[in-house]
Image (cartoon, helix red, strand yellow):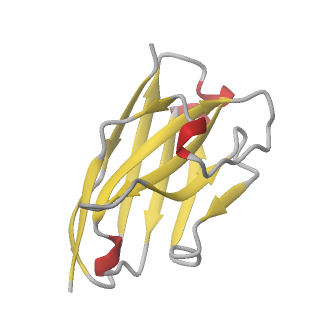
Amino acid sequence: QVQLVESGGGLVQAGGSLRLSCAVSGRIFSTYAMGWFRQAPGKEREFVAAISRGGSSTAYDDSVKGRFTIFRENAKNTVYLQMNSLKPEDTAVYYCAARSTYYMTTVDSSTRNYNYWGQGTQVTVSS
C-alpha cells in the first residue's frame, strides 16, 4: 500500500511563498515519477508540475513557470513544491501524485496516468 501525505499548505498574502511537501511510504520512492496537481472550487483538477524518478527532468504548467519549483529528495522519500510570488489565482487544494514507471526521465502531466494520490492540502492566497 502506497501512501502520500501532503503538508505545508496555508494562508498567505499575494506575493508570498509557501513550500509544500509530500511524504511517500510503502514502496521504493525512486521508482515513481511524481506530480503536483491542484483543484479550485468548481474547477477540474489541473496539472501544476512533475518530476522524473531521478529528478533530472521536470515539467511545469505555463501558469506557474518561473514561480514554482518541483524537486525531490529520494533519500527522504519526499517531493516538494516551492511556490514563490503567489497569486490569488493559485488558491486551490494541492495534491501530490505518484506514477510507477520504468523510465528514469518520464514526466507526466495527465491525471489519469498517476496511480496514487494524497489527500490534498489547502493553499489560500489573499489579495
Q: Quadrant of the C terminus?
A: bottom left
Residue 105 percent across, percent down from the top left: 79, 44
Q: Is residue 58 above or below residue 4?
A: below
Which quarter of the picture shows residue 33?
Answer: top right
Residue 39 percent across, percent down from the top left: 34, 56
Marker count (numbered):
0
Say which residue appears at 41% left-offset and 53% top-offset: 45
Left or right, 7 with reference to 101 = left
Say which residue appears at 44% left-offset and 44% top-offset: 96
Residue 88 percent across, percent down from the top left: 28, 79
Say which residue appears at 54% left-offset and 28% top-offset: 115
Left or right, 24 with reference to 57 = left
Q: Residue furthest top?
A: 1
Q: In this view, does 9 lie above or below 98?
A: below
Q: In which quarter of the image is the N terminus?
A: top left
Left or right, 62 with reference to 104 = left
Residue 5 percent across, percent down from the top left: 35, 34
Say which residue appears at 73% left-offset and 40% top-offset: 54
